[in-house]
Amino acid sequence: MGLLRDSFNIAARDILIESRRAYEILSIIFFAISATVLASVAWGTPISITIQEGVASLWLIIFFTSILLFTTSFSREMDRGTIGGLRTLPSQPLAILFGKVIYSVVMLLLVIVILLPLSIVFINIQPTVEIFELLLILIVGVIDLSFAGSFISSIIMYSEGKTLLLPFLLFPISMPIFIPALLSSEKVLLGLAFTEYSGELRLLGAFLVLVIMVAIFSFETIIEE
Amino acid sequence: MNKFAVECIDITKQYGHLYALRKLKINIEIGEIVGILGHNGAGKSTFLKIIGTHLSPTAGSLNILGNDVKKVRSKVRRSIGFIGHTSFMYDELTSEENLRFYGKMFSIYGEPLERKIDQVLDQVDIDKYRYVAIKKLSHGLRKRVDLARIFLHSPEILILDEPFSGLDQTVVETLVDLLKKQSGVTSLLSSHSFEIMEGFCSRMLTFREGLVVNDTKSD
């Protein structure tokens, strides 16, 4: 209970800070919008874009957008010295990670809310009856990505080359998220039954459990020293 | 009842081959105001960071108010107020918002939290800046907000690493007065300046190359 409450406090503080620095989230949103339009131009006319191409574009945009978010997630605390304040807190160290994850999920969902209508117009994503299934996959994928990205962000915060290290590390680690999320999104939009993509959802769930377990055993060491 | 606020038993801190602290054995009694002196690299900040649970020692053990830090770090942190070299405040938030965040993290909520915020802002005399973003405050005012932060959860031990650096004489005097008023609270402060510390510290520790080379108590 205390862990969750502290996590939400940290996330709420990060969102408040973000609202005071609107230019950062606006730059992420602008990147997502321009990438969608560019993908549309690159594939030809929107109407000719296949489901596979549209879904691949959507997840690529989410992935690259998330890199912008994770780059500053922990490094900002480190660069400004506020990480020291977090180390004085009596809360469980995991609350700091979970707080950052909640903050990242909120920010990425905000991007998706803007991205989804644009995807319908520009990259021919046509969720009709499958909108809720697609949203479920997007939410699960974003939670997975947020856990993996925030954890990597915490590992690299001490490094001078963090902006280089983050995409390098996130790329291989996000593959177990990216591939099942992509495949399940395709299957949903192709109108396949839940049983056809439940395997991919289970993979996403299993990866989430794995990242949480790794974080439970290692995060205290990462944050304390 | 435990007599010591801090008990260091053979504390060593090593960074690779470099020794920051060497087998320190220090006991600090409850209510003492301890000034920590020494040149750069003498081990003052490392010592304070270890007491403040920011750093773990390479060897040795540390008890705070009778509690082993390794076993009950969270409980120990509730009894410590720590100010480091840099401010722990978030630039974009106001003084009040920063204090509210830290208060909640120390499990103070609702009306008691709002009352406590009013009290500490008044205590450090920055109530008129409560709605001003930290980035707009001067160095001295930021320091006061930092002080307000550590008074929020009424800690039994105050740890202040170079609290007077970059402050003018008036602000230094205000801070000293504030610290003097904390009766029964154990305080540890580091500084390069013997003159400031000798006036109000009940004990002075001088560090050199990771060792305490002088330990003087005033009457």
Image: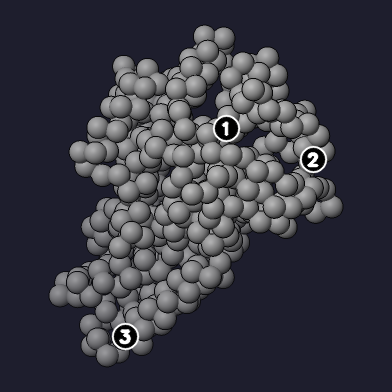
SS state under label 2: strand
A149 horizontally vs A128: left or right = right
Task: Check disc 1 and give the amino acid type.
Answer: Glu
- The amino acid marked with disc number 2 is Leu
- Circle on res. A197: 3
Q: Quadrant of residue A66?
A: bottom left
- On the picture, is B69 further left or further right than B195? left
Q: Where residue A65 sits in the image (x, y, percent)?
A: 43, 55
- Residue extending furthest top? B170
How far apart marks 1 and 2 lie (CA) works out to: 20 Å
Which residue is the extreme one toward the bottom?
A195
Q: Residues within 10 Å of mark 3 (few under 14, many from 20)?
A: some
Q: Position of residue A222 (x, y in %)?
A: 58, 59
Q: How far is the residue under mark 2 from the one under mark 3?
A: 64 Å
Residue type highlighted by circle 3: Tyr
For residue B32, the mark is 1
Front residue of B115 and B139: B115
| Point 44% across, 35% down: residue | B150
The kind of secondary structure element at disc 3 is helix
| Chain of the residue under label 3 | A
Query: Residue tagged by mark 2?
Result: B211
* Picture quadrant where residue A117 is located: bottom left
Q: Residue at x 32, y 48 (%)?
A: B107
- Mark 1 or mark 2: which comes first in sequence? 1
Q: Position of residue B138 (x, y in %)?
A: 48, 17
Query: Which residue occupies 52% across, 13% down?
Result: B173
* Mark 2 or mark 3, whichever is nearer to me: 2
Local packing at callout 2 (Cα closer than 10 Å; few below 14, some 14-19, many 20+) is many
